[in-house]
């Protein structure tokens, strides 16, 4: 399959994406179509079906196949502390600044959201950093109202995130002291300890949905830190704009937005964010757009 882009008929592709939208609720028509076509082609191969039309008929009678298709349409490569320098920057500057600012405002609520959280590695990494920060500063974590949220459109990925049991490749970037402190190694797998698991809530949320501004389990928006990494790259430019606007609206003034290594803030958003670290792709919100 490598190299050659498979031919998936455009008309059948449009019908297929419409069906997914109707049945599953996600609109993949504004994702980069090359990736979507390759992934559908792969699904056809796995199902032993030669063309989109026949696959559409199969979908009619098989709701579970929609879930499998959505799983295949989305890429879930992730790991704990992916791009370690980004997490170093969060540990050294972003988290201490958020907590210090909150202290000045006498506000003990800290809200952090990982949009497109895959198996939870990213938001759990932030939870570990927070726990470590409070421990080092001898601050009582219970004195803070922490809300850490991981959202994704892949239900299976969310279930795995809630179980929080990982293979070795997911924890390769985890520092030894964190590995010893927060994981239990059992039967070749790394089990995240309850004290970290309990810090995070996971729920299904489609970041491209124009119906919801904030994820359902977030009461309002007001996030201090949003990680939306390695997700925008799958969207076309108009969808990127829509999603960045949504992230902007979901952030507190002065809140941080972290993008993926291969992603940048679109030019039209530059007036509304300051570049906090161009290397780590961390941006800081200036003011609300009226
Ligand atoms: C490549 S992973 C990135 C995981 C993690 N953020 C990281 O950078 O390591 C992209 C994730 O985004 C999810 N995703 C794709 N489309 C989405 C959407 N419309 N809303 C929310 N999540 C989505 C996928 O299911 C996948 O888990």
Image (cartoon, helix red, strand yellow):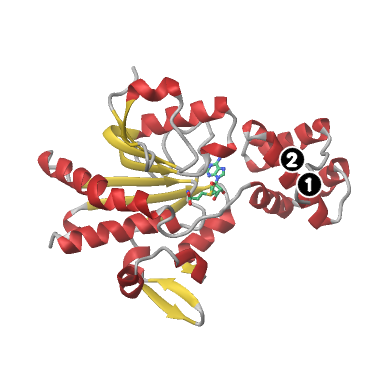
Task: Please tell me the numbered disc located at residue 18.
Answer: none
Determine the CA span between mark 1 and mark 2.
6 Å
Task: Please tell me the numbered disc located at residue 41.
Answer: 1
Residue 168 image point, x, y percent = 50, 71
Q: Residue at x 29, y 49 (%)?
A: 90
Check whether the beta carbons of the residues at disc 1 and disc 2 lie within 8 A of each other: yes
Q: Secondary structure at mark 2?
A: helix
Residue 185 vertical placement versus 127 (above, below): below
Q: Nearer the viewer, residue 165 or 82?
A: 82
Residue 159 vertical placement versus 74 (above, below): below
As drawn, is 43 to the left or to the right of 187? Answer: right
Residue 41 image point, x, y percent = 78, 46
Neighbourhood count class around disc 2 (C-alpha, 10 Å): few under 14, some 14–19, many 20 upward: some
Q: Residue furthest bottom?
A: 187
Q: Residue at x 39, y 39 (%)?
A: 281
Residue 120 image point, x, y percent = 46, 57
Task: Please tell me the numbered disc located at residue 37.
Answer: 2
Residue 198 image point, x, y percent = 35, 63
Q: Secondary structure at mark 1?
A: helix
Q: Is mark 2 within 8 Å of ligand 1?
A: no
Neighbourhood count class around disc 1 (C-alpha, 10 Å): few under 14, some 14–19, many 20 upward: many
- In which quadrant of the rendered image does the C terminus lie? top left
Residue 133 falls in which quadrant of the image? Answer: bottom left
As drawn, is 104 to the left or to the right of 205? Answer: left
As drawn, is 150 to the left or to the right of 222? Answer: right
Q: Is residue 61 visible?
A: no
């Amino acid at each position: 399959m490598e190299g050659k882009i498979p031919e998936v008929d455009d008309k059948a592709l449009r019908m297929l994406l419409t069906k997914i939208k109707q049945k599953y609720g996600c609109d993949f028509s504004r994702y980069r179509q090359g990736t979507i076509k390759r992934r559908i082609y792969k699904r056809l191969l796995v199902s032993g079906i030669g063309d989109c039309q026949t696959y559409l008929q199969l979908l009619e009678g098989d709701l579970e196949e929609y879930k499998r298709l959505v799983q295949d349409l989305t890429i879930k490569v992730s790991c704990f502390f992916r791009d370690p320098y980004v997490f170093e920057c969060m540990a050294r500057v972003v988290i201490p600044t958020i907590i210090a600012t909150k202290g000045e405002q006498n506000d003990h609520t800290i809200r952090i959201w990982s949009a497109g959280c895959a198996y939870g590695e990213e938001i759990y990494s932030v939870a570990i950093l927070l726990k470590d920060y409070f421990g080092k500063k001898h601050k009582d974590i219970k004195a803070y109202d922490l809300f850490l949220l991981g959202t994704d459109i892949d239900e299976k990925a969310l279930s795995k995130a809630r179980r929080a049991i990982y293979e070795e490749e997911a924890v390769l970037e985890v520092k030894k002291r964190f590995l010893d402190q927060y994981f239990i190694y059992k039967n070749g797998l790394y089990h995240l300890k309850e004290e970290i698991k309990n810090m995070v809530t996971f729920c299904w949320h489609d970041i491209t949905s124009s119906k919801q501004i904030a994820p359902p389990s977030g009461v309002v928006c007001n996030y201090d830190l949003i990680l939306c990494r390695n997700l925008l790259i799958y969207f076309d430019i108009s969808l990127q704009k829509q999603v960045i606007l949504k992230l902007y609206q979901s952030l507190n003034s002065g809140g941080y937005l972290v993008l993926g290594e291969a992603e940048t803030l679109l030019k039209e958003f530059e007036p509304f964010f300051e570049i906090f670290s161009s290397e780590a792709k961390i941006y800081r919100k200036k003011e609300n757009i009226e």
